Image (spheres, coloured by chain):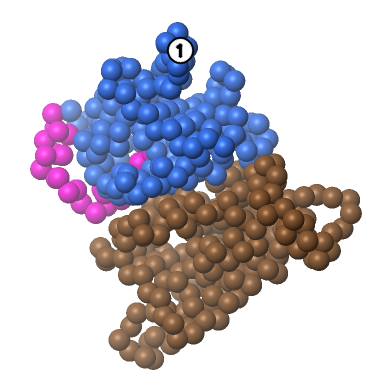
Chain colours: A blue, B brown
């Protein structure tokens, strides 16, 4: 079993571990392809009104097994984050609880629940796009616990899977999801007869930095 | 929002926080009743062949909302731990993703995935019976990461819910689950035409301290 391999490059590309430059590029292109699919899912989820702007794709042997998004609002299920949904669907499709021959691509850094599910399913490799901070930046401030809980605690370090944080284009397209879906997502959470403009939402967010309790609760469908 | 309140008493009773002895006793009795129900679910789950020996009960206003057990094997879903299943079912029943007026009783210490789901559902109070070590003792040694990940990391301390570890009778009945279901549970995981006796299983466990990989994978349905 491999030890954890968290790789973060600063060279503007998705980080991969390989001794061969040609192979590195192939892996990078491959990762980019599947990460893009996860990002597309994130957009799709908000578009459909199913939940937060998060997508996840399970891949086996270069083939997409399942491609899912956050279904929290649609399923009335706080555990239906994109990653958990993808794992559930992949297990159903492959008819087994062991996904050790699979990888997962997530549009955003997984929360502790999702990271736990990834470990339990024995997925061998995780590639994610945006940092949790990108979600926090649009106002999902209740997810602070997620970053705090995972970082510097040994939780990642103890995991027996390879973890890749996308950089460069991969990170950019993943982070853009939040800004680009913000209006639709917030409208989803605050159903109103009056169509709010992006400017109005920005203004509202500025004024309501801590939100009201009810709104916080509804925002708490991160993943 | 209350700060975390982890209470562990050594007086042979379930730990509760109250300034009034009479009230303490009432809360203790109440906790014992619901924890017993969670423990019963743990037995039921193995009896039905649905998954590992773990149960969870969601309670609101002194009423059981749902009573569930590990469904990993039955649903072919590694995320179908008792707690996650209970949260999903409770949300479905109450038709909302916010369980902030509910408590959860778990037969065993929740894993990080389940603890994340508890936080996401905003459950206000968690009472659990056995420590993860009780499960480890019967051979579910892959759950080491669970205890390590949660303890001493600030993950519990940051949680905005009250956490009660049962002691005394509550802990004993919860810990007994593992010893008492071991034979059935192991048979569930190693389907064999030959009925294995408890002695044979003990002998097998002694010889196969680290198990084979395939067996480990199947054992990895803790929660």
Helix, strand, or loop for circle 1? Answer: loop
| Towards the viewer: A152 or B158 | A152
Q: Please identify the residue farthest to the top as the structure is shown.
A: A22
| Towards the viewer: B129 or B135 | B135
Whether residue A216 is visible: yes
Mark 1 surroundings: few (<14), some (14-19) or many (≥20) residues within 10 A: few
The quadrant of the rendering that contains the C terminus of chain B is bottom right
| Towards the viewer: A75 or A133 | A133
How far from the left and from the top, in percent, is residue B222? 59, 54
Whether residue A71 is visible: no
Q: Residue at x 14, y 45 (%)?
A: A208
Q: Which corner quadrant of the image does residue A96 belong to?
A: top right
Q: Which corner quadrant of the image does residue B43 belong to?
A: bottom right
Q: Residue at x 49, y 37 (%)?
A: A3
The magenta segment: A199-223
The quadrant of the rendering that contains the N terminus of chain B is bottom left
- Does residue A140 sit above or below B37 in this rendering? above
How far from the left and from the top, in percent, is residue A99? 60, 34
Q: Which corner quadrant of the image does residue A29 belong to?
A: top left
Residue A215 part of the magenta segment = yes
Which chain is home to disc 1? Answer: A
Residue B125 part of the magenta segment = no
- Does residue B68 sit above or below A72 in this rendering? below
The reply, left or right, for residue A164 in relation to residue B78 is left
The reply, left or right, for residue B2 in relation to residue B101 is left
Instruction: From the image, give the main secondary structure of the stretch colored magenta.
Output: helix
Q: Which residue is mark 1?
A: A20
The reply, left or right, for residue A18 in relation to residue B18 is right
- Does residue B183 sit above or below B95 in this rendering? below
How far from the left and from the top, in percent, is residue A149? 33, 49
| Towards the viewer: A152 or B87 | A152
How far from the left and from the top, in percent, is residue A178? 28, 29
């Amino acid at each position: 079993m491999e030890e954890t391999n968290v790789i973060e490059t600063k060279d503007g590309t998705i980080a991969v571990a390989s001794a061969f430059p040609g192979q590195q590029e192939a892996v990078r292109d491959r990762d980019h392809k599947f990460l893009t699919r996860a990002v597309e899912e994130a957009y799709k989820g908000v578009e459909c009104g199913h939940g937060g702007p998060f997508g996840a794709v399970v891949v086996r042997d270069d083939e997409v097994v399942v491609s899912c998004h956050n279904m929290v609002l649609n399923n009335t299920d706080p555990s239906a984050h994109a990653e958990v949904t993808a794992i559930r669907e992949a297990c159903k499709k492959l008819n087994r609880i062991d996904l050790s021959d699979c990888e997962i691509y997530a549009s955003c850094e997984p929360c502790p629940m999702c990271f736990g599910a990834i470990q339990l399913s024995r997925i061998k490799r995780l590639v994610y796009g945006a940092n949790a901070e990108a979600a926090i930046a649009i106002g999902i401030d209740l997810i602070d616990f997620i970053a705090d809980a995972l970082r510097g605690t040994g939780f990642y370090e103890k995991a027996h899977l390879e973890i890749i944080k996308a950089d460069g284009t991969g990170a950019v397209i993943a982070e853009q999801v939040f800004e680009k879906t913000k209006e639709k997502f917030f409208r989803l959470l605050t159903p109103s007869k009056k169509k709010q403009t992006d400017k109005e939402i920005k203004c509202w967010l500025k004024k309501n930095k801590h939100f009201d309790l009810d709104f916080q609760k509804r925002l708490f469908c991160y993943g």
